[in-house]
Image (cartoon, grey):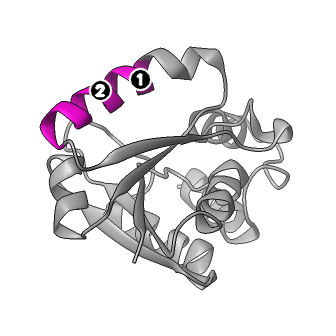
Amino acid sequence: MKRAIYPGSFDPVTNGHLDVVERARKLFDEVIVAVAHNDEKQPLFSLEERLELLKQTVGKIDKVRIGKFDGLLVEFARSEKASAVIRGLRAVSDFEFEFQMALMNRKLESTVETIFLMPKEEYTYLSSRLVKEIGRLGGDVSKFVPAVVVTALEKKLKK
């Protein structure tokens, strides 16, 4: 079985993320969408909330599983018997950081390949950070995220 990991913070999951999942699903027998737990970041949504939002969106897609991990991504990939890591590239500005991470991951675990996938053009500007900013300022994010995320953002930002 060819299995890939699509890691990220998914704070929150966007339509761009969903597009990358759909693309990866065509290439692999199974895609694990894995939420990274990082104590150094202050996400808007808790780890549990992000996992739940993923379950309500990508968790319903055939050949997709939701997971979480701490520590090194390559260790998680090894434990899940994944042969690849999926990374979304929106623009050239993403490439330098992602390329550096891919080379480091290859050095740490040579059997895990990094596959770069580009989302549809309509999502190349989209990021979780921008969605949160638009939401904080009272803007409409419904074109950028699934409906369950719109509702979750509205509840979270009213607090």
Residue 77 magenta: no
Residue range in magenta is 97-109
The answer to which image quadrant residue 136 occupies is top right
Three-letter amino acid code of the residue under disc 1: Phe
Q: How many C-alpha atoms fall within 10 Å of the one at disc 2: few (<14), some, or many (≥20)?
A: some
Percent of width and height locating residue 151: 69, 67
Q: How many C-alpha atoms fall within 10 Å of the one at disc 1: few (<14), some, or many (≥20)?
A: some
Residue 6 versus residue 120 in the image, above or below = below
Q: Which mark is residue 22?
A: none
Residue at figure coordinates x 68%, y 71% from the top left? 148
The answer to which image quadrant residue 100 occupies is top left
Near-viewer residue (4 or 134): 4
Three-letter amino acid code of the residue under disc 2: Leu
Give the Cα separation between the discs numbered 1 and 2: 6 Å
Residue denoted by label 1: 99
Horizontally, is 87 left or right of 22 in the view?
left
Residue 14 in view in this figure: no
**Contact (Cβ within 8 Å) of mark 1 with mark 2:** yes
Q: Secondary structure at mark 1?
A: helix
Horizontally, is 21 left or right of 123 in the view?
left
Percent of width and height locating residue 38: 23, 45
Residue at figure coordinates x 69%, y 43% from the top left? 135
Q: Secondary structure at mark 2?
A: helix
Residue denoted by label 2: 103
Which quarter of the figure is the N terminus placed in?
Answer: bottom left
Residue 106 magenta: yes
Q: How many marks?
A: 2
* Magenta stretch: helix, strand or loop mostly: helix
Residue 74 in view in this figure: yes
Percent of width and height locating residue 32: 42, 68
Percent of width and height locating residue 126: 71, 36
